[in-house]
Image (cartoon, rainbow, N blue to C red):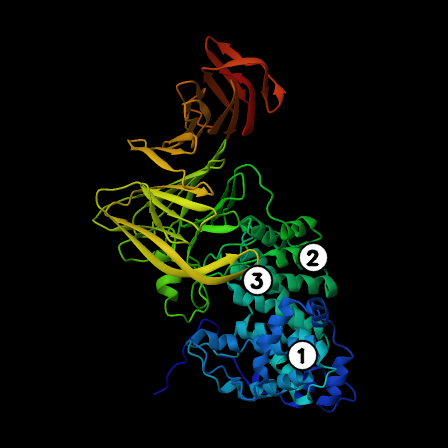
Amino acid sequence: MITAPVQGPEKPRHIDARVTALTDDDLIAAFGRPEGVTGVAELRAWVGARLRPAAWPLSEWADRVRGSAEATKIIAAADRLLDNDLDVTGADQGRSQRYGWHYLGWLAEGIQAWLLTGDHQRLRAVDRHLVRWAETRDSVIGEWPGLDVIWYSLGTWARCRNLLPALEVLTPSALSDQAWRDLVAALIGGARWAYDEHDRFRHGNWQLVSATQLIQLAAVLPDLTEAADWDRRGRERLLEHLELDIYPDGGHYERSPGYHVMCLDAVQLAAMIDRGYGDGTILRHPRVRAMHDWLVTLTGSGGWVPHLQDSGIVWPADWLRRGGELLDAPELITAAGARRVPGPPAIDLLPDSGYAVLRAEDDLRIVINLGPHIEHELESHSHRAVLDLVLDGWRRPLLWEAGGPASYDVPDYLTWYQAGRGHNTVTVDDAELDDDRGARLLGSWTAGPVLALSAEHHGHGTAQRREVIMAGVEPVVIIVRDRAEQTAPRRFRCHWHAVDPWVASGTGFRTGSAGGPGLSIIVLPDADETVRFTEGVARRPDPASGTADYAPLYGLEVERRSGEFTTVLRPGPAADDLDLVAAGGEDGRVVVQTADVVDTIEATRWVRRDASGVLRWAAAWAGSDLDLPEVSVRQRDPLARTLASIGLATEADRIGLDVISTGRSGLRITGLTADAGLRLNGIGIDAHRDGGVITIGLPMAGRWRIDGLCL
């Protein structure tokens, strides 16, 4: 019986001798049979005189890092190559790690260590292991069905990325001719395989990065007879990916910061090559700049991007610095080298990638995942959570999540790292979120100092909605409302995770180390609920060292039959100042006291007063009017529905209004008087007065500041 070959994530197997078994004569032919070249030694000398520098020459890198902590770490890692019995096959690695072993990053470390130390014993070790790898590589069997360990997209890309920059320093070195020809043969074979594989567009990071190495190899070794074809195909695929695989907001298709910077690194490499050897088309593509801006949006005060969707912690400074140099954009270099400058409360949306960032006036911010499940060639990097969030401030994580694993071979990859329970979200029964989750943003509003966002999804078969509302000025308070449709009995679990253990505090819980910023949390109670403490692991970013090691992640889990949860959060050094005064009612009212103020939060309204009841500020959003005992601000024509939000602030008896309208509108104000200095966006205006009612027109959509009103 004939068994059909297993279909893997790429094309059916297309590996032959022109890829895997190049003879010396094949190598000479690949370079067009240069005159006078009859063997490898002559070919090596000929290539050495004609090859061009890679995007970032390895010798320049060595000069820059020699004597640094980075250099010390690389040299220590490369010490394993001094072992004559090093297993170059990776046979003892896990299912996924075995593929990664043949990226030859470990061999690149050996080359780097030789350059940094000048120790020829290290070069001899590279020589020995490179030849052994070439002799044994095709005997290695992978465990992913239909996916060859050596000849697949990430393998051919990574080996070129790791070894091509070394060709310039290895060609004139004491490396043996055998090792040199094995290196060049691996590069040519990999390019041939990638050229055949990527003859049409497909989504994902595998093809994008492969395209960039076709471009670089063709540029560094332009005398290869296939170089022009490789360059053309690489450019075609890369430009297609910039159009179809990079969202307009700059994010990569898979929505993972780790894979985003993997792709950005490749795009930067191709742009550098294009600037030096091409026409600059790649560098000028607007999505290249957008990819850098995406990182800036997601970077917090600690200098990191959260570990979303299988990502590790991303420290984007190097990519931003390089991007600033490539794009002649000094603002990117500034963003790479400085903490974010505090500004007023604001919401940044990445609508195509499906993320929202809510920023308080200092360095506190919330990152919310609003996006879809994204497919992948092999396994999706999308986690089984949506509308989940992380909170950080004061250069440390406050609400945190499991993030990505150290390896996809870890046993709890699917049951912890990707699972809903490892995220700050609401799970249903013991089920994981469906691929088709229907997540969508319902609205986001800035209303004076208040930031509000509402979104929903259907990933558990019924509608679940989450609202996140933050008072972005001190004392900062955050309200998270979760609601769910219920058509049958179910069990809902609301999960909150922190980097320090949760301890009981008043009517809620607190987390945080002594002397540092903490977080208090109150989940409004329900008659039928169970509270549990859990523990997992997650990377924990350390801004001082720029590292993120795994450490315990402490969970607070509230389970109940109802899918309704209202959570009150108070972050910061004064996190203990949180008392629940009252809760309940049809409008979902919550009254909390923090320090010397009392906050009353309703469905679409927030009022802050001092302890004696004097109004400090108020806000309304989602088209709501602002009605207080002292003052009322309403849309003059209630049918117009063009008033998005209202912010009101007091200073002594003076009142300032911040209004956002989505079209022509008018305000009907009672309880206030207007003086002669009434101004709209700094321009003196006359208001219509009718008894105790002031009417102010807003001529078009926009943000409007109104001054000159008094209590």
Q: Residue at x 69, y 77 (%)?
A: 117
Direction from residue 185 to residue 143 in the image, left or right: left
User: Residue 201, relative to residue 465: is it above or below?
Assistant: below
Circle 3 residues within 10 Å: few <14, some 14–19, many ≥20: many
User: At numbered mark 1, what does the secondary structure look like: helix, strand or loop?
Assistant: helix
Q: What residue is pinned by disc 1?
A: 114
Element type at mark 2:
helix
User: Which label sits in the foreground, 1 or 2?
Assistant: 1
Give left or right: position of 204 versus 454: right
Q: Is residue 27 above or below residue 295?
A: below
Residue furthest out toward the bottom: 38
The CA distance from mark 3 to mark 1 is 28 Å
**Residue at label 2?**
326
Q: Which mark is residue 47?
A: none
Mark 1 or 2 closer to N-term?
1
* Residue 399 image point, x, y percent: 43, 50
Q: What is the C-alpha distance between the residues marked 3 and 2?
A: 16 Å
Amino acid at pointer 1? Trp
Q: Is residue 211 visible?
A: yes
Residue under pointer 3: 263
Q: Quadrant of the N terminus?
A: bottom left
